[in-house]
Amino acid sequence: SAGGAELPVLLASRLVERADGQRLVILTLTDLSLLRRAEARYQSFFENVIEGVFQSTQSGHYLMVNPGLASILGFESPQELIAHFKDLRSQLYVDPADRDTLFRVLRETGQITGFETQFICKDGSAKWISLTAREVRDPTTGELLYIEGLNIDITARKEAERALKESEEKFRHTFDQSPIGASMVSLDNMFLRANGAFCRITGYTEAELKAITFDSITHPDERGESLHQYE
């Protein structure tokens, strides 16, 4: 530039001939500064985002992965990960049928969002992944070139859901098998659940209890006190 700064440009030339026979070269310059800055921002995002970014072929090879995906799966680098996987269907997926499902949905809709599956890590352990991807096709022929997308590690969420489910099942078993009468009552005094012991004590079936209120089976002298403790 006039100020002495270096600028990235795209130079194109075309030879033309004037009516008088004189031959000229027309030069055009395209400033690539904005493109280079955009590329740098994308590269920074690609390298530093903790989620796994990828491009892979339908035949089962990774074309490109970011450090985030390598970290999720326990590899030292993207290069090590790409070299490790020769067939994604059999090596990466805990259930290979999930990859078949992935491509079936992509064929039907062109994209998939929040597809949950399990990936096999370098050390053989498994991680839950939420996968979002889209097809990239040749604009001329329509041929599928590759798929690209994002892999998010949701293992911690899945483990929390499993622990909650086990806790609920344990509570349900304890509630149902308890020799002590137990019931669940909503804040408007409607029965939600009652165990066998509670039904035996009151003489009502659980279905009958769900059709009445808690205060309807409470002695009138105790009714006010029973209701007051939930206010």
Image: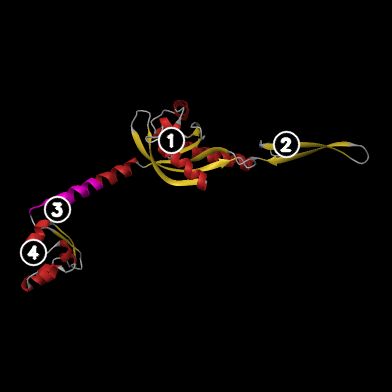
Q: Residues under labels 4 and 2: Cα distance?
A: 92 Å
Image quadrant containing the C terminus: bottom left
Q: Which residues are magenta?
A: 164-179
Q: Is residue 144 left or right of residue 31?
A: left
Mark closer to the chain start, 1 or 4: 1
Mark closer to the chain start, 3 or 4: 3
Mark closer to the chain start, 4 or 2: 2
Q: Residue 141: give x, y in percent of width and height.
A: 63, 40
Q: Residues under labels 2 and 1: Cα distance?
A: 38 Å
Q: Secondary structure at mark 3?
A: helix
Disc 4 marks a residue whose amino acid type is: Thr
Seen from the viewer's position, the closer of residues 62 and 1 is: 62
Q: Nearer the viewer, mark 4 or mark 2?
A: 4
Q: Secondary structure at mark 1?
A: helix
Q: Residue 49: give x, y in percent of width and height.
A: 45, 40
Quadrant assignment, res 181: bottom left
Disc 4 target residue: 202
Residue drawn where x is 32% and y is 42% of the image: 156
Disc 2 target residue: 11
Residue drawn where x is 72% and y is 36% of the image: 11
Disc 3 target residue: 176
Disc 1 target residue: 69
Q: Is residue 120 left or right of residue 64?
A: left
Q: Residue 17: give x, y in percent of width and height.
A: 88, 38
